Image (cartoon, rainbow, N blue to C red):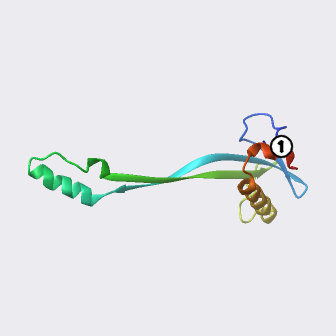
Amino acid sequence: MKYPDHDGPVNQNIEVSIAGRMYYMSFYECERSTNTVNILPMALDGVLASKDMDPVLEEHHTSRFGNWYILITIEDLGFKDGLQPNYIHQEKIVSFLNSLRQLYYATDNYKELLFKSK
């Protein structure tokens, strides 16, 4: 919503100006999850099975916890990665992304972005 003039997929190659230079910004969501094997419930069900009883904790043999993240890439017009530590304007790009993050956290209603300046 912040860049309505963009043609193409909403999350790919959005032209942004950072410190007077043009860049392409792309973003996507990614989940990072942790899967755990819970040995105690498995052992208790094993004891019950040895006594010819049905397992009662079968649904607790494993657990999963995950978080979602927004991943952002910034490339210059020559498709060089602007977030590489040795990229000449990397600090300015990181500063731009930090301000974008603050705007994201401060926005309750994303239609409000239509009224905020680019």
Q: Secondary structure at mark 1?
A: helix
Q: Which residue is mark 1?
A: 114
Report which quarter residue 93 is drawn in: bottom right
State left or right for residue 51 relative to residue 84: left
Asked whether the viewer can see residue 63, the reply is yes
Does residue 94 lie above or below 51 as drawn? below
The front one of 58 and 81 is 58
The front one of 59 and 13 is 59
The front one of 34 and 25 is 34
State left or right for residue 63 relative to residue 106: left
Q: In the orientation shown, which residue stands out farthest toward the left?
A: 51
Residue 74 % position (x, y): 74, 52
Residue lying at 73% horizontally and 38% vertically, measured from the top left: 10
Residue 56 % position (x, y): 22, 49
Residue lying at 78% horizontally and 65% vertically, measured from the top left: 91
State left or right for residue 54 relative to residue 60: left
Tell me the amino acid under the disc marked 1: Leu
The quarter of the image holding the N terminus is top right
Asked whether the viewer can see residue 2, the reply is no
Q: Residues within 10 Å of mark 1 (few under 14, many from 20)?
A: few
Residue 26 % position (x, y): 72, 46
Residue lying at 74% horizontally and 52% vertically, measured from the top left: 107
